[in-house]
Amino acid sequence: MTAKHILTYDSTLRDGEQCEGITLSLEDKLRIVQRLDEFGIDYIEGGFPASNPKDVAFFQQVQQMGLRHAQIAAFGSTCRKGVAAEEDQGLTDLLACGAPVVTIVGKTWDAQVERALRTTLDENLRMIAESVAFLKAAGRRVVFDAEHYFDGFKTNRSYALRCVEAALRAGADSVDLCETNGGCLPFEVEEVVAATVERFPEGNFGIHCHNDSGCAVANTLAAVRAGATEVQGTVNGYGERVGNTDLLTVIANLELKMGLDTVGAHSLEQLTSVSHYIAELCNVSVPAHYPYSGTSAFAHKGGLHASAIARFPEAYEHTKPALVGNSSRMLVSELAGKASLLQKAASLGFDLSAPWIDEQAILDEIKDREARGFSYEVADGSLGLLLMRKLGAYRPSFTLESFRVIVDDREDTGALAKDAMSEATIKIHVGDKRFVATGEGAGPVGALDNALRLAIAESYPQVAQMELTDYKVRLLDESQGTDAITRVTITTSDGHGSWGSVGVSENVIEASWNALVDSIEYGLYRARSRS
Amino acid sequence: MTAKHILTYDSTLRDGEQCEGITLSLEDKLRIVQRLDEFGIDYIEGGFPASNPKDVAFFQQVQQMGLRHAQIAAFGSTCRKGVAAEEDQGLTDLLACGAPVVTIVGKTWDAQVERALRTTLDENLRMIAESVAFLKAAGRRVVFDAEHYFDGFKTNRSYALRCVEAALRAGADSVDLCETNGGCLPFEVEEVVAATVERFPEGNFGIHCHNDSGCAVANTLAAVRAGATEVQGTVNGYGERVGNTDLLTVIANLELKMGLDTVGAHSLEQLTSVSHYIAELCNVSVPAHYPYSGTSAFAHKGGLHASAIARFPEAYEHTKPALVGNSSRMLVSELAGKASLLQKAASLGFDLSAPWIDEQAILDEIKDREARGFSYEVADGSLGLLLMRKLGAYRPSFTLESFRVIVDDREDTGALAKDAMSEATIKIHVGDKRFVATGEGAGPVGALDNALRLAIAESYPQVAQMELTDYKVRLLDESQGTDAITRVTITTSDGHGSWGSVGVSENVIEASWNALVDSIEYGLYRARSRS
């Protein structure tokens, strides 16, 4: 018997981006979609169409991506009070964005209809029914997002059920029961969902929770036990206030603990790297002590247990870490084992399977550098160079003699003055030749980048095709303030594709320099490989 | 009718200290005991007596503290196999330390007895019974910690129950059911605890969970529903791997959601400060997105919600934040109108309600600056300065004439060299005086920070109390590469609290300078307001 499939619905790009401190560029959003699609998520919510130019562009570009499996959902509201569905601008925008799935939020808590929406209970039912019917008539898959469903059910059960009924009768493909406040406990969620499923056995129900009581994962699992067939959440639980349900932890629990199918066992092995990859794009870290994907999730204290772990691993690990792509060693990487290193290297064009290649030495080097703050998850360029060095296939295109960066500023207000000037002078050697070049820039890294390009332009004209498209800075030990180790990650594009590189130092300029050198070196290697 | 009391048992000093990255001094441990006692925790586990000099000293000194309410527990194991209880050194040490409560861990999973302990099932029962009886005869309150109880129950229910029976018959005051691996889900915990309570209606049962499935809080609440009368956990969930049950979140849920009594409603208002105080002693931060005590736990953002909150707060907050000593916070970037600006300003101590104040002009300025890349969500310091400027209440403590930053590097490999040097020279004016100072640092921002502190130390000695605790960099338009607008966010602490500041520029050094100036200016304003 095959396991029952539970649909997965990711809201990282909509509810997740509500998280204080997370801002995603258009390119970030598209890369997240790509990764979630590969992972096997069923529905990916892209955001509100037409709310800003970035989201307009997102819905246009995502249609060109040729997704393997996932369907894109656009998010909006029911029509406004007193407005017919076909005349409502929001609904029109939802159709215009071209997403095959449309999720519309509507109210189901009587008090909220009357006090927040300030309309009648009947008008709210009309808004739900007409909006769903309008979108269905246009051929969309429609999800009705029942806002505050659990609060509504507790205070006026009959009205909350009538809202669900209105959506289902109008043709909603599924009704997402939304625990908007995040304050419910699992036994309450189980009871409400069970009563709703019993009342509408023909309906499909999803569950959407928030973590304000620290129970979002448990609430979501309780809803599945009660009959929900779709789970909503965000990667790593990103979301406003305390966050949304962590979709990854839910997926791991459904697959490993409840015998249900979501992305499937094979994809599940990607869980840890999906968690870290998307965290990186959000420019935050996965907390070390995070369920399943944290670097400490399967870390064992030394001494006392070590011998016992070998004898009886089930006593110390609630699941096999490899099932979620994590490791019981303290290694922060998707490259934890030889098999995955071989696979990753092959994807970069390096064959490590030859018998004279010492994969263990390569793994040790990666582990050592990760312990010093490097991260290769989005730095394929630096990883490729590391592999070349270990294979003896690396010869530097240029070597640094020295650089100096000067930033001058003069101002008499603390406001946004733009008169700061950065100047970088570098001295490098290409073969027997010595080049000295000075570059200017709005900032010190731009100045360094310009100086380096000038210095090598004669030797390597192909550098003109390379463009630095992303530059990220992360402080690794924030308790050290400005003296913390800094990790700089750069993305560079050459029109054929893009690659990441990483640099680490106590000095942000030096970390940037190291990442810049890797980005250019790897770009030159790519150019050589093509010609 | 008064609410039923659930006993609280804190293991921060024992299981919590197993958390990677947390090390507590003797003084830290005593301060934590003091605070947890004031908070109303019933039992505080101090650690393993006699395992090291720090713990020996702890158990001696804690007896002199004159605790108001809490009882101290010492932690150890049953006697060893083949050793009589009265001859076991560990049990002797537990008595010698003088703690009124003794918690001893023993095995209850048949496979673990045979494979890890390597003895017979009967010998294990003897070890449990004799150890409990020995400690009871010495007049201690005895807690039997049933290790791996849930795994044991699932594989050999009858043997797990016999272990519990042995402890209870020997006089154990309570049996702590330990979900050692952290892999169970709430419905499993509820089932196992209910069956155990039903079998031994005369016993007192505690519950001890780990968070490996992301369900520790829910598992603990499920056990209470099934009849457990004591909850174990650690402050903020500190513990090895993914951590223990967060005792504070459990307490809040029991009191506010399940109508049970723990520390009582009055003490509950201390919850947020207990969370932050103990985090401080552990030298970590409470994550912003943390249930109940996080700074974002009651923060509001998002176009859909913003306007409605004032009209209908229950729709957006699962509980009143004041009940746990937290407060709601409006994120400025989504300030929908004047009402929310007034509320935010009031929380910073500014009254904008006077008729001569033009709130619209302030809102326009905020919107204008946000459009240029500023973000005031986590930058209360910069927002406070902006309000002061608009109110005409701002006078700069110092003005910049100029700064120059130089970063020099010399190297011949692209690897992690650490010889880069940063030097910053600044020229500023404080009133009629001109100061010139040079600072060095591992990076350019550290150098600038040091130079600024040197330059103003004579005029503002209180700057010595301010410490830069977090420094973040974000590129806003990443398609511009290194020329993108850079936003720098800094967090500074003065021992009384912390505040954020923000700076924006195309130049990362200048953005950092602007954020630094705001952080120091707002810190000086805070110091003036206190004196």
Image (spheres, coloured by chain):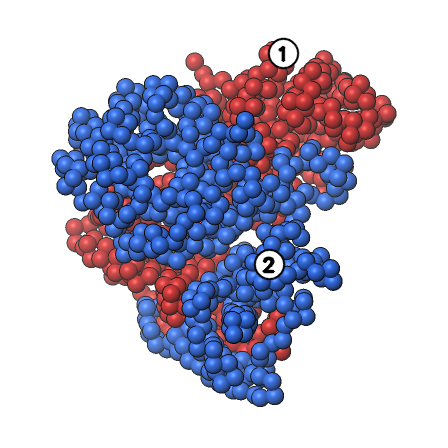
Chain colours: A blue, B red
Q: Nearer the viewer, residue B6 or A188?
A: A188
Q: Is residue B14 above or below residue B387?
A: above
**Residue type, mark 2 in image:** Ala
Kindly identify which chain the residue marked by label 2 belongs to.
A
Percent position (x, y) of residue B113? 76, 26
Q: Is residue A352 above or below residue A3?
A: below
Q: Quadrant of residue A529?
A: bottom right
Asked whether the beta carbons under mark 2 and mark 1 sit within 8 Å of each other, the answer is no
Q: Nearer the viewer, residue B239 or B76?
A: B239
Q: Which residue is mark 2?
A: A346
**Residue type, mark 1 in image:** Arg
Secondary structure at numbered mark 1: helix
Q: Nearer the viewer, residue A520 or B468?
A: A520
Percent position (x, y) of residue A385? 60, 67
- Tell me how far mark 2 sits from mark 1, CA to CA: 58 Å
Q: Nearer the viewer, residue A83 or A99?
A: A99
Indicate left or right for A157 with A374 as reference: left
Which quarter of the rendered picture does the N terminus of chain B lie within? Answer: top left
Circles 2 and 1 on the same subunit: no
For image coordinates 27% across by 56% down, the residue present is: A53
Residue B62 seen in render: no
For image coordinates 31% across by 43% down, the residue present is: A100
Secondary structure at numbered mark 2: helix
Q: Which residue is mark 1?
A: B199
For image coordinates 46% across by 18% down, the residue present is: B3
Percent position (x, y) of residue B300? 33, 43
Q: Residues within 10 Å of mark 2 (few under 14, many from 20)?
A: few
